[in-house]
Image: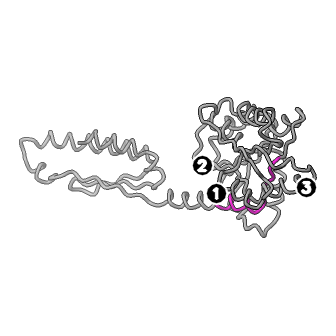
């Protein structure tokens, strides 16, 4: 079964993705997944895409943290990743700008990067004096765009930074319209392809695990002894039939096969994935038959 992989991002990210998929050297197993590409030009596009497609997708890849945060307001994803920007991506963006701008890059604000990656970049960018990193707050996820935009604007307007570096194209365009010096963090082919390979590998492993045969055995304690007691035979037999009925109902729920092997023993064959998804039903069944 092929993996259904959705990618939601900016146009420049989707262009990069096409380049990666067209390069065999990246090692992506393209025959093992079907890629669904979705571009967003407005935040509303994200909500629309997620609501229309979430049920049939195995994993989501988002081009930036803002897209991910907006999407998670609409749905809970089994598996999702945000494309990371590493220290080298920041260095490639900042270093040429510093040479051309005559010192504007020594104080800047940044988003879509981890603290560790920012610090690694600063070691190489010796001219940098102050960096303000956006960390985001879950409580403002519904207002994430405005909060992110405000983060950069306030730092610039209050003179703490001379440059804003963002990983989101909508924030980049908005800051540029306001004549605020801004750079858009680039994506790196190797980092992006490694992440996609990792996601596909994880899903393949999970699919294999979920397809494994699961056998559940139910044993009625002291069944033969109870059945030999004539004065309670019919009561015990009714209970036995009721138990069998409950087990059959559960077997249907897990799309399994039911086998009665005698002496109060039953076996249910299904798959590990279905059984794990229906674990609450298994617990409920135990309460019913005990």
Q: Nearer the viewer, mark 3 or mark 1?
A: 3
Q: Main secondary structure of the magenta part?
A: helix
In which quadrant is the N terminus drawn? bottom right
**Labelled disc at residue 279:** none
Instruction: Judge depth for marks 3 and 2 and give the one in front.
Output: 3
Answer left or right for 290 relative to 208.
left
- Relative image position of residue 13 (x, y in whole percent): 80, 50
* Dot 3 or dot 2, earlier in sequence: 2
Provide the residue designation for mark 2: 79
CA distance for labels 2 and 1: 8 Å
Q: Residue at x 7, y 45 (%)?
A: 230
Instruction: List x then y, in percent, for residue 37.
Output: 77, 47
* Among the 4 quarters of the image, the one containing residue 25: bottom right
Horizontal side, residue 180 vs residue 278: left or right: right
Where, by quadrant of the figure, is residue 93 drawn?
A: bottom right
Residue 124 lies in the magenta-colored region: no
In this picture, which residue range is highlighted in magenta? 184-199
Camera-side residue of 239 and 146: 146
In the picture of the structure, the residue carrying the numbered disc 1 is 199
Q: Where the C terminus falls, by quadrant? A: top left
Q: Identify which residue, 267 or 56, lies in the foreground.
A: 56
The answer to whether the residues at label 2 and label 1 have Cβ atoms under 8 Å apart is yes
Frontmost residue, 195 versus 236 = 195
Q: Residues within 10 Å of mark 3 (few under 14, many from 20)?
A: few
Question: Where residue 45 sits in the image (x, y, percent)?
Answer: 76, 34
Q: Is residue 122 above or below residue 53?
A: below
User: Sequence order check: which comes first, mark 2 or mark 1?
Assistant: 2
Mark 3 lies on residue: 99
Disc 1 packing (10 Å; few <14; some 14–19; many ≥20): many
């Amino acid at each position: 079964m092929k993996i259904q992989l959705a990618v939601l991002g900016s146009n420049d990210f989707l262009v990069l993705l096409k380049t990666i998929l067209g390069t065999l050297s990246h090692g992506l197993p393209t025959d093992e997944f079907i890629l669904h590409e979705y571009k967003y030009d407005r935040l509303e596009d994200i909500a629309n895409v997620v609501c229309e497609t979430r049920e049939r997708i195995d994993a989501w890849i988002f081009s930036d943290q803002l897209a991910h945060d907006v999407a998670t307001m609409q749905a809970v994803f089994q598996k999702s990743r945000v494309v990371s920007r590493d220290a080298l991506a920041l260095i490639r963006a900042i270093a040429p700008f510093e040479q051309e701008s005559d010192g504007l890059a020594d104080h800047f604000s940044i988003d879509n990067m981890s603290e560790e990656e920012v610090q690694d970049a600063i070691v190489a960018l010796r001219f940098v004096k102050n960096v303000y990193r956006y960390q985001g707050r879950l409580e403002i996820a519904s207002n994430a765009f405005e909060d992110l935009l405000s983060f950069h604007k306030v730092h610039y307007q209050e003179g703490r930074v001379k440059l804003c570096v963002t990983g989101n194209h909508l924030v980049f365009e908005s800051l540029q319209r306001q004549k605020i010096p801004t750079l858009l963090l680039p994506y790196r082919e190797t980092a992006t392809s490694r992440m996609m390979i990792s996601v596909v590998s994880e899903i393949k492993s999970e699919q294999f695990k979920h397809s494994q045969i699961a056998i559940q055995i139910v044993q009625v304690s002291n069944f033969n002894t109870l059945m030999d007691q004539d004065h309670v035979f019919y009561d015990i037999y009714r209970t036995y039939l009721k138990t069998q009925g409950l087990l059959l109902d559960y077997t249907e729920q897990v799309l399994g096969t039911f086998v009665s092997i005698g002496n109060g023993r039953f076996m249910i064959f299904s798959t590990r994935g279905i059984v794990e998804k229906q674990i609450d039903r298994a617990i409920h069944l135990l309460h019913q038959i005990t």
